[in-house]
Image (cartoon, rainbow, N blue to C red):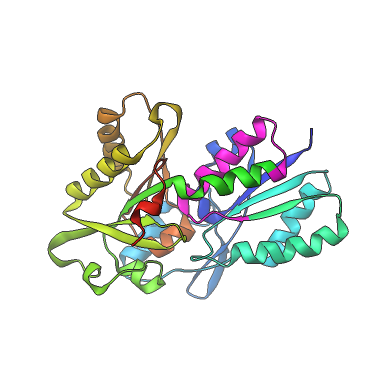
Amino acid sequence: MEKVKIFTDSCSDLSKELRDKYDIEYVKMNTVYNGEEKEANLDWVEYTPQKFYDIMRNGERITTTQVPSQEFEAEFTKVLDQGYDIVYIGCSSKLSGSVEMGKVVAKDLLKKYPDRKIHCINSLNACMGEGALAVKASQFRAEGMNADEIAENVKGIRNNVNQYVTVHSLDALKRAGRVKATSAFFGNLLGVKPIIISNTEGDNIPIKKAKGRFNSMQEIVDLTVNNIVDPDNQCIYINHADSEEDAIELEKMLKEKLPNTETHIGYIGPIIGASIGPEALAIFSFGKNVEQYNV
């Protein structure tokens, strides 16, 4: 059987627990704060989550970079030397240039490793939407699929990732240019909270608004429940930006309606966190095609 290594990147927010369970590698992006560039390690090596998000709570900005070419070359070469093919599932190309950089590096590497295969896939998602696709890729591998088959199957389910996010404030998203919306969705008037999805093109777009934190949490739970497919045979991922108590409450709300569904709570990591800001909450599952939100 052909050996395949699954890669993702810092945008995927895959916890070490999940990376170890599903044998998934990742290539690192970087954060930049006060002119200092640091690796965006998913295990919070450079920052604790509280320290990271407190910087943003204080009104300061952290910026990010795509995966450097040297990182791709170093990490891909390691596994190519071991006889692996590669399936890299990267952040939406609407949010990062990493997938395109990966393709450039892959093209050069394949000259040296002509018998190997490297697939660089635009996930059309980020955070655990991207991470969930990497987990699926690992499961496809466990079923005996080769790199070509894994890539084809991942591409076939990208638009079935249901992402429902609510943010405490749109300020960080506006500054980072990471959400497409009319002016009506911007601002924090009277505690109105937007509900944001990832659409068929991989853009983050707001689809609804809710009044207050609890109602926004209820809204993303209801959207998940109403759109999920085969809930008893998948894991729902709940991610938070240093708001663990609310994430636990979200899990309880979901379990009331989907008692047999597995759940996993994790952090929104430094790359996504730098754009979305503290106290954001997100739910990810596989469900109806997001083309339903196309206008």
Question: Hey, which residue is sitting farthest top in the picture?
Answer: 260
Left or right of residue 140, residue 52 in this image: left
* Viewer-closest of 27 and 2: 2
- Answer whether residue 67 is visible to the viewer in this image: no
- Is residue 137 shown in magenta? yes
Q: Which residues are magenta?
A: 121-148
Left or right of residue 171, residue 215 in this image: left
- Answer whether residue 61 is visible to the viewer in this image: yes
Left or right of residue 166, residue 124 in this image: right
What residue appears at the point 20 percent right and 51 percent down from the top-left corner? 213
Q: Quadrant of residue 111?
A: bottom right
Above or below for 230 versus 241: above
Secondary structure mostly seen in the magenta stretch: helix
Question: Hey, which residue is sitting farthest left in the picture?
Answer: 190
> How far across and how far down the image is residue 79, in percent?
77, 47
What residue appears at the point 16 percent right and 60 percent down from the top-left corner? 191
Above or below for 91 versus 158: below
What residue appears at the point 76 percent right and 46 percent down from the top-left corner? 85
> How far across and how far down the image is residue 140, in percent?
62, 35
